[in-house]
Amino acid sequence: MENILDYTLEELQIWMKENGESSFRAKQIFDWIYKNEWNFENMSNLSKKTIKNISENFYIGIPEIIREIKSDIDGTQKLLLALKDNNLIEAVVMKYKYGNSICISTQIGCRMGCKFCASTVGGMIRNLTAGEMLGEILRAQNKIGDRISNVVLMGTGEPLDNYDNVMKFLKIVNSKYGLNIGQRHITLSTCGIVPNIIKLADEKLQITLAISLHAPNDLIRKKTMPIANKYSINQIIDACKYYINKTNRRITFEYALINGLNDKNEHAKELSNLLKGLLCHVNLIPVNEVTESGFVRSTSESINNFRKILEYNGIETTVRREMGSDINAACGQLRRSYMKGSLK
Ligand code: SAH
């Protein structure tokens, strides 16, 4: 049995033809699934024979909700989801004025090893398939009873470490027969796997690329991000220039401020010099204090100073509005506490 969500429309059309069905059935099935009908039996415009044929070969891989936590502060909803093989992932739904946004996971666990991040503590179990990533969105839409219009690939996992599945996922999310979410409403965040940033640039998509930089130089970056031993910041910046050239899209640099480590005035100046002239903006994030990491968030005074220095140097800067701070909404923390047994 295969997860039908792993199929693009074209692939399902081919399957139909090869299995004695008319190819237009594929569109009908897509239409049902992406309108939240997840039982083949209820797809009333399909023939009995088609329903039998499709049910014998496919399942609709929507993950089950194991835990659900809603923020009292801003309504952010965190979903702990179980996949068909019982592995757990998490997704976060945020409500903004302009629509609903979802932060999805791309892998089960992560092998990048960033020291401040809860997702990486147990290592990586496996990649998610395109269909499993889509399942996160479909489940969440069904849960909130509303359309999701923005997707950020910023949950557990490194999207560029699961390149092919993520590309297929983007294709189906974007397709008018799939979720029909515009590329400009999708953000992919990476810790900086340089060859795959270049590859992504060559796809010439209109998605937003976010780079988890978190340091103004390689020395500091190596203290928290093992990937910095493989690719230097200069290589990342060159890859970003290439991305901008190919796509004309503004890059987001994420910078988690950690007390004493990367939040001093000199670091802000160094970062300004690094990014000057680049089509980009910086998103400052007060680091979420993960129990295992021991890192402490910067004071609001340091955060403000840091932002002022960047802005003074002409770098557009935002401080991330913290969503769901009362529900451990960040980066693998729910899955982590569930697996440690501290959340029952
Ligand atoms: N692997 C990808 C996407 C997942 S992480 C990446 O590295 O970009 C999403 C973002 O959350 C990244 O910027 C990541 O560095 C950041 N992050 C992880 N743990 C964090 C924490 N404890 N506090 C603040 N940001 C964190």
Image: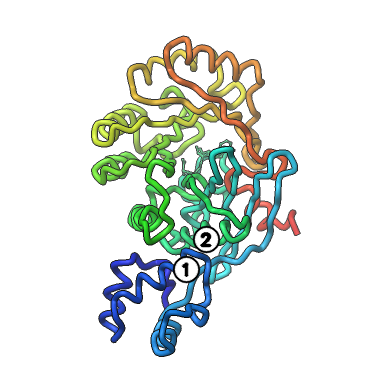
Residue farthest along the front direction in this orientation: 45
Q: What number of labels is visible?
A: 2
- Do labels 1 and 2 touch, CB within 8 Å? yes
Q: Quadrant of residue 89?
A: bottom right
* Residue on which disc 1 sits: 33
Element under label 1? helix
Q: Quadrant of residue 85?
A: bottom right
Mark 1 residue crowding within 10 angstroms, few (<14) / some (14–19) / many (20+): many
The residue under the point 25% across, 33% down is 242
Q: Position of residue 302 (x, y in %)?
A: 61, 17
The residue under the point 63% across, 23% down is 298
Task: Examine the rendered structure and indicate whether residue 120 appears above or below residue 136.
Answer: above
Q: Nearer the viewer, residue 150 or 258?
A: 150
The residue under the point 50% across, 31% down is 223
Q: Position of residue 20 (x, y in %)?
A: 29, 86
Element under label 2? helix
Per the rendering, the mark at residue 58 is: none
User: In the rendered structure, which amino acid carries the disc numbered 1?
Assistant: Ile
* Residue on which disc 2 sits: 138
Q: Earlier in the sequence, mark 1 or mark 2?
A: 1
Q: Is residue 329 left or right of residue 105?
A: right
